[in-house]
Image (cartoon, rainbow, N blue to C red):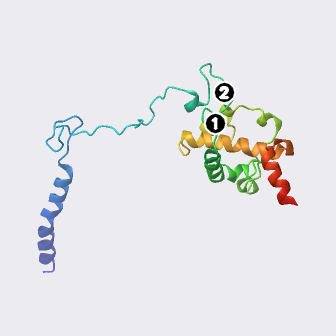
Amino acid sequence: MARRPLLALLALCLPFGVACRSDMQNQPKYLPLQPSGLFANGDSSRPLIDGTVARNSIITPTPWSSGKDAGGDFVREAPVPVTTDLVARGHQRYDIYCSPCHDRTGAGGGMIVLRGYKRPPSFHVERLRNEPDGYYFDVITNGFGIMPNYAQQIPIADRWAITTYIRALQLSQTATLADVPAAERTKLDAEAH
């Protein structure tokens, strides 16, 4: 006798289960480029936002996007105006993405290295001080050795900002008093006394 209420409940719920499946399978939708009365221009597809780049699209390499000139050589200097704001942005991005391995001074002793990861070279060795800016951009973009690529995580503008900050780090380790502009040197002398 206990079966009748169970069967009645099942019979009552069955149409609701079928209806949900039917609605989900037969959703109203527009196919791409199908006419529609929903939008004023009569199209169902919306125009792309300016600057949209399709995933995996081929971007024509330029010094800005590849770090290389037309001949395929690394550009000597970043193709962006180096400003205080750009270097500050590079500092911020470097601290986020690079310092875990390279540490905050660029010597290569970051927290990841302290945990057993292979030590990257110091940015202050002669070989890396002499590399062109395009080299750093390319390494950030494509990776090198055990360093993974960061093309997905770091936008192009930020890769150039990091490159300019690495140059500032390198300069900070080799700068002399003669490198300080005369007006700033006078201020420093006044503060020291």
Q: Which residue is mark 1?
A: 137
Image location (x, y in percent) of residue 171: 78, 43
Q: For the point 80% across and 42% down, which residue is it?
A: 124
Can I make out residue 141 in this image?
yes
Q: Front-most of 169 and 6? A: 169
Residue at image x 11%, y 73%? 8
Q: Of 193 and 81, which appears nearest the observer?
A: 193
Q: Residue furthest bottom?
A: 1
Q: Quadrant of residue 181?
A: top right
Q: Are marks 1 and 2 in contact (CB under 8 Å)?
A: yes
Q: Which quadrant is home to the C terminus?
A: bottom right
Q: In the rendered image, which residue does mark 2 sit on? A: 74
Whole-number angstrom distance, CA of label 1 to CA of label 2: 9 Å
Q: Quadrant of the N terminus?
A: bottom left
Is residue 181 found left or right of 21 in the rendered image? right
Q: As displayed, is residue 11 above or below residue 47?
A: below
* Among numbered discs 1 and 2, the one appearing first in the sequence: 2
Quadrant of the image occupied by residue 20: bottom left
Kind of residue indicated by mark 1: Phe
**Residue 126 at what x, y percent from top left?**
82, 36
Give the image location of residue 59, x and y in percent: 48, 29
